[in-house]
Image: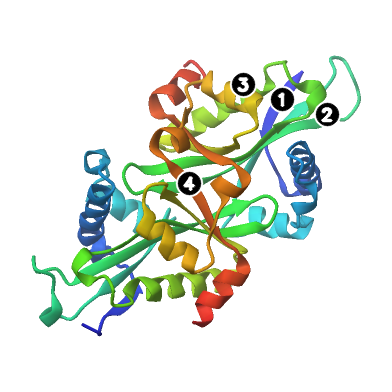
Amino acid sequence: MFNPRKAEPRDVPTILRLIKELAKYEEMEDRVLLTEKDLLDDGFGEHPCYQCFLAEWQEEQSNEEPKVIGFAMYYFTYDPWIGKVLYLEDFFVVEEFRGKGIGSKILKLLSDLAIETRCSNMHFVVAEGNHSSIEFYKHRGAEDLSKEEGWRLFCFDKDSILKMAAS
Amino acid sequence: MANFILRKAEPNDVSDILRMIKELAKYEEMEEQVILTEKELLEDGFGDHPFYHCFVGEVPKEKQSSEGFTVVAFAMYYFTYDPWIGKLLYLEDFYVMEEFRGFGMGSHILRLLSETAVKTRCSSMHFIVAENNTPSIEFYKRRGASDLSSEEGWRLFAIDKEDLKKMTTPK
């Protein structure tokens, strides 16, 4: 039985574990530098930088503790043409639990939240090689803005920022 | 023209911000897609929980634009989160009115944003640029920006309101 819920401070080690599993799935595991302390301060302090839904799984009629087998990390961004946007940052279901509709249920929860909080849109980024995820999203109406409108994601890393701050 | 000031936007700046959002959208040939109102900008930026922050560039009255505006530049940003490295500063919109370009205002705004990023312990500054916007791409690349779409193949996706509603829990 699948039970979605909002993450709590005690879930931080689990969130970090799942972040690393997703990064491993994207072949980028060594790029995860975040620590449990960062996640705790940033997600459960006075001004949370992110929010999380967790997907818990419990076998029917089992006394075992429910296992967290998926998560979605999101926050609110702002589009100057249309206003508030729900930004889906990370979204992952552990491999052995895929195909059971858990991903769809989480997306449904996120959609409920987006509508409740008067968001015009949900945005997220997908790696162009991740065909199964692209299909999953396109199947639900997602459009590839990079393709259709030619938007490209750019980044200034810390060194460049420091150089510009000192200029 | 050498003198201008950069400052944090105030509630009174909302009509200038909306004007410049529309000018920037026009520059990107998307002007009719701006449906945001001054009321929403005010509530969303200056309420209890701001969803965005803004710097504006202002010139003295004697240097006003040909149409009489003194607020002539803006940068809209907010904070996002990368689950690998933590807090990021996300630069959403960045615009200097055409007649005020070439005087260093853009560079100064970028410096202010960089100082903000450092102060708030952000690991990175992210933003998107239209692939055919060569002058902006050059401006950013000159200052060290990398094109993550090109290098890492990230593509930006969107699910709009109609499709979100289709996915919501039936009432």
- What's the distance in space between the residues labelled 4 and 3, CA to CA? 27 Å
Q: Is residue A13 visible?
A: yes
Query: Mark 2 highlights which residue?
Result: A66
Q: Amino acid at mark 4?
A: Arg
The chain identifier of the residue carrying mark 4 reads A
- Say whether marks 1 and 2 touch (CB < 8 Å): yes
Query: Mark 3 highlights which residue?
Result: A104
Q: Are marks 4 and 1 on the same chain?
A: yes
- Say whether marks 4 and 3 touch (CB < 8 Å): no
User: Residue A20's x, y, as percent?
Assistant: 78, 44
- What's the distance in space between the residues labelled 4 and 1, CA to CA? 36 Å
The residue at the point 54 percent across, 68 percent down is: B117
Q: Up-down: is A56 above or below A162? A: above
Circle nearer the viewer, 4 or 1: 4
Query: Mark 4 highlights which residue?
Result: A152
* Lower sequence index among marks 4 and 3: 3
The residue at the point 79 percent across, 47 percent down is: A29
User: Residue B51's x, y, as percent?
Assistant: 43, 53
* Lower sequence index among marks 4 and 2: 2
- What's the distance in space between the residues labelled 4 and 2, CA to CA? 40 Å
Q: Is residue A167 left or right of residue A9?
A: left
In the displayed orientation, state which residue is furthest to the bottom: B2
User: Residue B85's x, y, as percent?
Assistant: 68, 57
Query: Mark 1 highlights which residue?
Result: A3
